[in-house]
Image: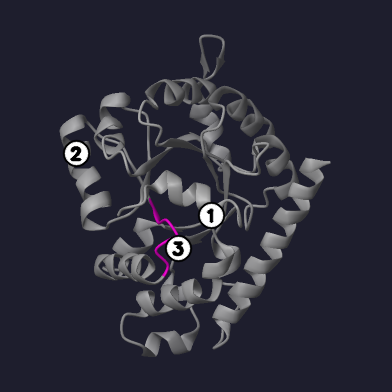
């Protein structure tokens, strides 16, 4: 029996809000790992084995794989997670967004080729570009809303009907969410905006990049977006965890950093509950 993405996520939130982004950059990997066949697969596998008990999800970024002609290793690493940690959902960070007929092919790519549990999408082309993905009712989609990069201001803060565009996106996403499998992407670097998004979308899941290298504040993020039942957020850290070490104990170093991040999240949750 297949368990839906949303069910996996709900189950995992009982133990963790941490999502680890898999952004494998060979130039940052320990030198010894390059002696192994399937360098990117080997690196990601060790990270996963070292941190699987600490996460609610993994988020491989497709560009890091495709830029290195490693799409086959992306397929293999997702299969590895499904076979060894079937309770952990995989979010393919692809940020797709195109006209309906092309979106159908991208949905097949994400959910049938790569067998991801969820995917990130760009809403710029409207609901007909989103529908092919949400039609996979057991899968999830995360729509870009208020991204963690400063350049997002140029578009996402444009005024639409007297308010910022990102709030209009949040409203549309709520309207589109008829299959209850849509979430949003909102960066930890903008906690006030995150709070405004949460107010609009009620209990929809929010994928939150920016708590690692980008310096987003975990406490403010939790205060802005956590739901009363201690759910609703996937706090994503990638490079800060992946590259915490650069020698043969890199996976152990990644685990230590992931544990520190979990401890910060737990502290923030305790403050949230006061």
The region drawn magenta spans 85-92
Label 2 or label 3, whichever comes before in sequence order: 3
Point out the image quarter for the N terminus.
bottom left
> Which residue in the rendered view is the most extreme toward the top?
161
Residue 232 in the image: state x and y as whole percent. Answer: 57, 41
Specify few, some or many for label 3: CA neighbours under 10 Å numbering under 14, 14-19, or 20 or more.
Answer: many
Q: Which residue is mark 3?
A: 23
Left/right placement of residue 215 relative to residue 145 reads: right
Residue 67 appearing in the image:
no
Q: Which residue is mark 2?
A: 104
Which residue does the image show at 48% across and 49% down from the upper left?
Answer: 9
- Report the colour scheme: one colour
- Which of the pair 159/97 is nearer the observer? 97
Which residue does the image show at 45% across and 63% down from the upper left?
Answer: 23
Identify the image quadrant of residue 149: top right
Label 1 or label 2, whichever comes before in sequence order: 1
Which residue does the image show at 35% across and 57% down from the upper left?
Answer: 62
Q: Which residue is mark 1?
A: 12
The answer to whether residue 97 is above or below residue 210 is above
Q: Based on the picture, tell me whether residue 89 belongs to the magenta stretch.
A: yes
- Which of the pair 138/67 is nearer the observer? 138
């Amino acid at each position: 029996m297949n368990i839906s993405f949303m069910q996996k996520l709900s189950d995992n939130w009982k133990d963790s809000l941490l999502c680890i982004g898999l952004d494998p950059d060979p130039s940052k990997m320990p030198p010894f790992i390059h002696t192994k066949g399937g360098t990117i697969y080997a690196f990601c596998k060790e990270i996963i084995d070292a941190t699987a008990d600490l996460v609610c999800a993994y988020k491989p970024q497709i560009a890091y794989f495709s830029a290195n002609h490693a799409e086959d290793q992306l397929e293999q690493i997702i299969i590895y997670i499904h076979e060894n940690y079937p309770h952990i959902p995989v979010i393919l960070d692809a940020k797709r967004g195109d006209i309906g007929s092309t979106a159908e092919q991208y949905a097949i790519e994400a959910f049938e080729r790569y067998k991801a549990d969820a995917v990130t999408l760009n809403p710029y082309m409207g609901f007909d570009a989103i529908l092919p993905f949400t039609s996979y009712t057991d899968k999830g989609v995360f729509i870009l809303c208020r991204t963690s990069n400063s350049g997002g201001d140029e578009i996402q803060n444009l005024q639409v009907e007297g308010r910022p565009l990102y709030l209009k996106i949040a409203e549309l996403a709520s309207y589109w969410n008829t299959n209850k499998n849509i979430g949003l992407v909102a960066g930890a670097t903008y906690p006030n905006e995150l709070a405004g998004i949460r107010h609009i979308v009620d209990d929809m899941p929010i994928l939150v990049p920016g708590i690692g290298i980008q310096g987003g504040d975990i406490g403010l993020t939790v205060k802005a977006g956590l739901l009363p039942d201690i759910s609703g957020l996937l706090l994503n850290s990638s490079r800060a965890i992946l590259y915490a070490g650069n020698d043969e104990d890199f996976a152990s170093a990644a685990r230590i950093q992931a544990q520190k991040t979990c401890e910060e999240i737990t502290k923030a949750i305790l403050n949230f509950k006061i």
